Amino acid sequence: MLYLGRPCYLQITHPPECSERLWTSQRYSSDVVASMSAAAGAFISEHHFKRVLLVGYSGGGALAVLMARRMPDIGGVVTIAGNLDPDAWTTLHGYLPLEGSLNPSLEPPLPAGLKQWYLVGERDKNVPRAVTARYFERIPHERVWSYARFDHACCWADEWPSIFAKISAEFAARQTPGR
């Protein structure tokens, strides 16, 4: 398992190349996606992983979707409360637009052969389902799993073991030749 943060995001001190734009308006930029894809790709290659599942929470969901397109060895993507339409998200909250960022809702759909799971909390006020509606219009409805009592933070960590077991079983079944 690899926990990957955006460039400069998890650092205590920031070197000069760590522009604040990388964690504000350009948090989903081509440069950020390329950097994260390269880091994940190097880790995958070094460890000779064959079945890779990208999992992203909140803004990490947007990045997982954007990275999946650039990484041919990815077998599946899971987003948890994913911010899959940053334009709608900034409008909802009255934030400045994320100029210089990519928007997964405006990118071509992910390849049909890529396994996908989109987890949504029905009580999420940070990234409500309405914010992701444009992205979900092109996703088969059975790939969007909705959880009635979940919000943006509540219950994901507590329920993750059972959710991940279900995803893992589907992922394994879909990876079996002849299925």
Image: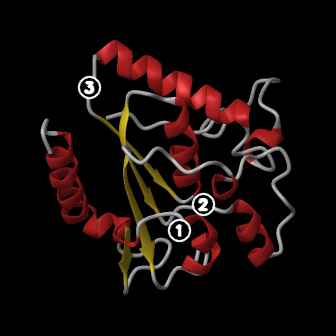
Amino acid type of the residue tagged 3 in the rendering: Lys
- Say which label, 1 or 2, has the lower sequence index: 2
In the rendered structure, find residue 109 and report the number of the disc placed on it. none
Confirm whether residue 13 shows in the render: no
Residue indicated by mark 2: 84
Corner quadrant of residue 135: bottom right
Give the percent coordinates (x, y) of residue 29: 73, 40
Q: What secondary structure is found at the residue carrying circle 2? A: loop
Marks 1, 2: nearer the viewer: 1
Q: Residues within 10 Å of mark 1 (few under 14, many from 20)?
A: some
Name the residue tied to disc 1: 136
Q: Residue at x 13, y 35 (%)?
A: 177
Q: Is residue 120 left or right of residue 21?
A: left
Image quadrant in which you'd find residue 80: bottom left
One can see residue 152 in this view: yes
| Mark found first going from the N terminus, 2 or 3 | 3
Image marks 1 and 2: residues in contact by CB distance under 8 Å: yes
Vertical placement of residue 87 versus 63, above or below: below
> Residue at image x 55%, y 51%?
109
Gap in angstroms between the C-alphas marked 1 and 3 = 28 Å
Q: Earlier in the sequence, mark 1 or mark 3?
A: 3
Residue at 72 percent across and 47 percent down: it is 102
